[in-house]
Image (cartoon, rainbow, N blue to C red):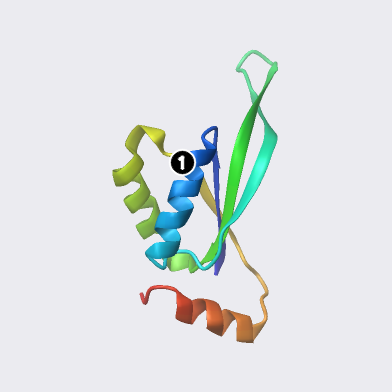
Amino acid sequence: MMVLQMVSTNEALLEEIAEYLLAEKLLYNVMLREVFDYRTGDGNGGIVTTQRYGLKGISKSLLFGRINELLRKKYKDKMPLLYSEPIILIDPEQTDVIAESLVKI
Protein backbone atom coordinates (compact mmCIF):
# COMPACT_ATOMS: atom_id res chain seq x y z
CA MET A 1 0.00 0.00 0.00
CA MET A 2 1.03 3.60 -0.58
CA VAL A 3 -0.08 7.16 -0.03
CA LEU A 4 -0.14 8.77 -3.46
CA GLN A 5 0.56 12.49 -3.30
CA MET A 6 0.14 15.28 -5.82
CA VAL A 7 1.07 18.94 -5.69
CA SER A 8 -0.21 21.59 -8.11
CA THR A 9 -0.95 25.29 -8.43
CA ASN A 10 -4.34 24.32 -9.88
CA GLU A 11 -6.94 23.23 -7.31
CA ALA A 12 -9.57 22.42 -9.96
CA LEU A 13 -7.08 20.11 -11.71
CA LEU A 14 -6.51 18.13 -8.51
CA GLU A 15 -10.26 17.88 -7.93
CA GLU A 16 -10.73 16.56 -11.48
CA ILE A 17 -7.90 14.05 -11.03
CA ALA A 18 -9.37 12.93 -7.70
CA GLU A 19 -12.75 12.21 -9.26
CA TYR A 20 -11.13 10.41 -12.20
CA LEU A 21 -8.91 8.15 -10.06
CA LEU A 22 -11.75 7.34 -7.66
CA ALA A 23 -14.09 6.48 -10.55
CA GLU A 24 -11.42 4.22 -12.10
CA LYS A 25 -10.88 2.53 -8.70
CA LEU A 26 -7.22 3.54 -8.71
CA LEU A 27 -7.54 5.42 -5.41
CA TYR A 28 -9.44 4.25 -2.35
CA ASN A 29 -9.88 7.71 -0.85
CA VAL A 30 -8.85 11.32 -1.45
CA MET A 31 -7.86 14.11 0.86
CA LEU A 32 -7.53 17.55 -0.72
CA ARG A 33 -5.50 20.12 1.17
CA GLU A 34 -6.00 23.84 1.21
CA VAL A 35 -3.31 26.19 -0.01
CA PHE A 36 0.11 25.70 1.56
CA ASP A 37 3.51 27.33 1.10
CA TYR A 38 5.75 25.41 -1.29
CA ARG A 39 9.43 26.31 -1.17
CA THR A 40 12.18 25.52 -3.64
CA GLY A 41 15.69 26.75 -4.25
CA ASP A 42 16.07 29.37 -6.97
CA GLY A 43 19.46 28.06 -8.16
CA ASN A 44 21.28 31.12 -6.83
CA GLY A 45 21.21 30.25 -3.13
CA GLY A 46 17.83 31.87 -2.54
CA ILE A 47 14.43 30.40 -1.82
CA VAL A 48 11.25 30.85 -3.83
CA THR A 49 7.92 30.44 -2.05
CA THR A 50 4.73 29.80 -4.01
CA GLN A 51 1.28 28.63 -3.01
CA ARG A 52 0.16 25.14 -4.00
CA TYR A 53 -2.63 22.64 -3.40
CA GLY A 54 -2.15 19.04 -2.32
CA LEU A 55 -3.93 15.75 -2.85
CA LYS A 56 -3.36 12.52 -0.93
CA GLY A 57 -4.96 9.15 -1.48
CA ILE A 58 -4.41 5.53 -0.55
CA SER A 59 -3.75 2.97 -3.28
CA LYS A 60 -1.79 -0.18 -4.05
CA SER A 61 1.91 0.44 -4.63
CA LEU A 62 1.79 -1.66 -7.80
CA LEU A 63 -0.71 0.81 -9.30
CA PHE A 64 1.71 3.77 -9.22
CA GLY A 65 3.04 3.11 -12.73
CA ARG A 66 -0.45 2.78 -14.21
CA ILE A 67 -1.66 5.95 -12.47
CA ASN A 68 1.40 7.90 -13.62
CA GLU A 69 0.99 6.72 -17.22
CA LEU A 70 -2.74 7.53 -17.34
CA LEU A 71 -2.23 11.00 -15.87
CA ARG A 72 0.73 11.76 -18.20
CA LYS A 73 -1.42 10.89 -21.23
CA LYS A 74 -4.48 12.77 -20.01
CA TYR A 75 -2.86 15.92 -18.56
CA LYS A 76 0.44 16.20 -20.50
CA ASP A 77 1.88 19.65 -19.70
CA LYS A 78 -0.54 20.20 -16.78
CA MET A 79 0.81 17.12 -14.95
CA PRO A 80 1.11 17.80 -11.22
CA LEU A 81 4.08 16.72 -9.14
CA LEU A 82 3.32 13.05 -8.39
CA TYR A 83 5.01 10.80 -5.84
CA SER A 84 4.18 8.16 -3.28
CA GLU A 85 5.12 7.20 0.24
CA PRO A 86 4.89 3.62 1.44
CA ILE A 87 2.42 2.68 4.14
CA ILE A 88 4.52 0.62 6.52
CA LEU A 89 1.80 -0.51 8.91
CA ILE A 90 -1.97 -0.59 8.53
CA ASP A 91 -4.73 -2.53 10.22
CA PRO A 92 -5.18 -5.87 8.37
CA GLU A 93 -8.96 -5.54 8.19
CA GLN A 94 -8.64 -2.08 6.67
CA THR A 95 -6.06 -3.42 4.22
CA ASP A 96 -8.56 -6.01 3.02
CA VAL A 97 -11.31 -3.41 2.56
CA ILE A 98 -8.98 -1.09 0.65
CA ALA A 99 -7.57 -3.87 -1.55
CA GLU A 100 -11.04 -5.12 -2.46
CA SER A 101 -12.16 -1.59 -3.39
CA LEU A 102 -9.36 -1.06 -5.91
CA VAL A 103 -8.83 -2.52 -9.36
CA LYS A 104 -7.33 -5.97 -9.47
CA ILE A 105 -3.73 -6.22 -10.55
Q: Could you say which quadrant of the image residue 93 lies in? A: bottom right
* Vertical arrangement, residue 80 with respect to residue 60, above or below: above
Residue found 59% across the figure and 54% down from its top: 56
Closer to the camera in the image, 41 or 73? 73
Q: How many marks?
A: 1
Residue found 68% across the figure and 74% down from its top: 89
Task: Kindly identify the amino acid type of the residue bearing the numbered disc 1.
Answer: Leu
Q: Name the residue under label 1.
A: 13
Specify whether residue 81 is in view. no
Specify whether residue 102 is in view. yes
**Place of residue 25 in the rendered image (x, y in percent of width and height, measured from the top left):** 41, 68
**Place of residue 85 in the rendered image (x, y in percent of width and height, measured from the top left):** 59, 57
**Place of residue 28 in the rendered image (x, y in percent of width and height, measured from the top left):** 51, 68
* Vertical arrangement, residue 95 with respect to residue 11, above or below: below
Quarter of the image with the N terminus in it: bottom right
**Place of residue 19 in the rendered image (x, y in percent of width and height, measured from the top left):** 45, 56
Which element carries disc 1, helix, strand or loop?
Answer: helix
Closer to the camera in the image, 40 or 51? 51
Residue found 51% across the figure and 35% down from its top: 10
Quarter of the image with the C terminus in it: bottom left
Residue found 64% across the figure and 13% down from its top: 44
